[in-house]
Image (tube, grey):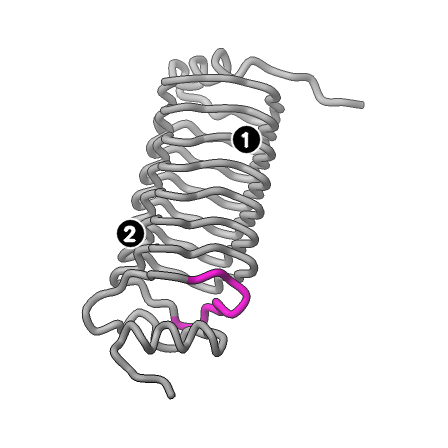
C-alpha cells in the first residue's frame, strides 16, 4: 500500500512552531523556495522529485532519510547532522554544508558542484558517480570514505587529509592543497593521475 503524501511546507511550519520532529512522512513533487526550517529533526522520511531553492535548514538533523531525484541547490545545511541517509540522483549546486556531520551516508549520482563543505565530518560515507567541481572540502575530516566514478575538478582540499582515499577510478584535475601538499600523503592515484600531480609539483617525468 502506497504511503500517504504530505504537504512539506505545512509540516515544516508546524515542526518549527511546536518544536517537534517530522517523522515517518513521504513528500513527492514539492517545489519550494525560501523556506526557513532551522534546527528541525527529520526522521524516517522520504523525499522524491522535490525542489528546494534557497531554503534554510541550518542546524537540522536528518536520520534515516532518503532523497531521490531532488534539487536542493543553494540551500543551507550549515551545522546539520546526517545519519543513515541515502541520496540518489540529486542536485545540490552551491549548497552550504559548513560544519555539517555525515555518518553512514550514501551519495550516488549527485551534482555537488560549488558546495561549501568547509570543516565537515564524513564518517563511513560513500561517494559514487558524484561531481565536486570547484567544491570546498577544506579543513574537513574524512573517515572510511569509499569512492568511485566521481569528478574532482578544482576541488579545494586545503588542510584535509586524503590518507586512505582511492581516487584511481575518479576524474581528477586541478585539486587545491596547502603549499606543502601534505593532504595527499597516503592517498591512492592511478599512474596517469600521478603523472599529472607530479607535473604540478615541478617534477619532470621522462
Is 77 within the magenta? Answer: no
Residue 62, how many percent across, how many down?
48, 36
Residue 45 quadrant = top right
What residue is shown with label 2?
119
Residue 18 quadrant = top left
Of pointers 2 and 1, the one earlier in the residue sequence:
1
Q: Of residues 193 and 142, which is closer to you in this image?
A: 193
Secondary structure mostly seen in the magenta stretch:
loop
Residue 198, how many percent across, how many down?
33, 78
Q: Of residues 150 and 23, which is closer to you in this image?
A: 150
Taking the view exactly as shown, the residue that stands out farthest to the front is 206
Q: Give the magenta range.
A: 163-172
Is 169 within the magenta? Answer: yes
What residue is shown with label 1?
70
In the image, residue 11 above or below residue 48: above
Residue 70 quadrant = top right
- Which residue is depicted at the point 55% across and 43% down? 85
Residue 141, how many percent across, how many down?
35, 59
Taking the view exactly as shown, the residue that stands out farthest to the bottom is 206
Secondary-structure class at tag 2: loop
Q: Quadrant of the N terminus?
A: top right
- Which residue is depicted at the point 69% across and 17% down? 4
Residue 137, how many percent across, how many down?
33, 53
Amino acid at each position: 500500500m502506497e504511503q500517504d503524501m504530505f504537504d512539506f511546507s505545512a509540516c515544516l511550519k508546524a515542526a518549527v512552531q511546536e518544536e517537534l520532529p517530522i517523522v515517518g512522512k513521504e513528500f513527492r513533487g514539492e517545489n519550494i523556495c525560501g523556506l526557513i526550517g532551522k534546527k528541525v529533526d527529520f526522521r524516517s522520511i522520504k523525499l522524491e522529485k522535490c525542489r528546494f531553492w534557497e531554503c534554510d535548514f541550518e542546524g537540522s538533523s536528518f536520520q534515516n532519510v532518503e532523497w531521490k531525484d531532488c534539487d536542493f541547490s543553494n540551500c543551507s545545511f550549515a551545522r546539520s547532522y546526517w545519519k543513515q541517509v541515502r541520496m540518489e540522483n540529486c542536485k545540490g549546486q552551491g549548497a552550504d554544508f559548513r560544519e555539517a556531520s555525515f555518518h553512514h551516508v550514501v551519495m550516488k549520482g549527485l551534482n555537488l558542484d560549488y558546495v561549501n563543505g568547509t570543516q565537515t565530518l564524513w564518517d563511513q560515507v560513500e561517494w559514487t558517480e558524484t561531481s565536486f567541481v570547484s567544491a570546498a572540502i577544506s579543513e574537513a575530516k574524512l573517515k572510511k570514505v569509499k569512492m568511485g566514478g566521481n569528478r574532482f575538478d578544482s576541488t579545494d582540499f586545503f588542510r584535509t587529509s586524503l590518507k586512505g582515499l582511492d581516487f584511481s577510478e575518479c576524474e581528477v584535475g586541478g585539486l587545491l592543497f596547502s603549499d606543502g601538499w601534505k593532504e595527499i600523503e597516503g592517498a591512492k592515484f592511478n599512474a596517469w593521475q600521478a603523472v599529472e600531480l607530479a607535473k604540478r609539483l615541478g617534477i619532470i617525468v621522462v
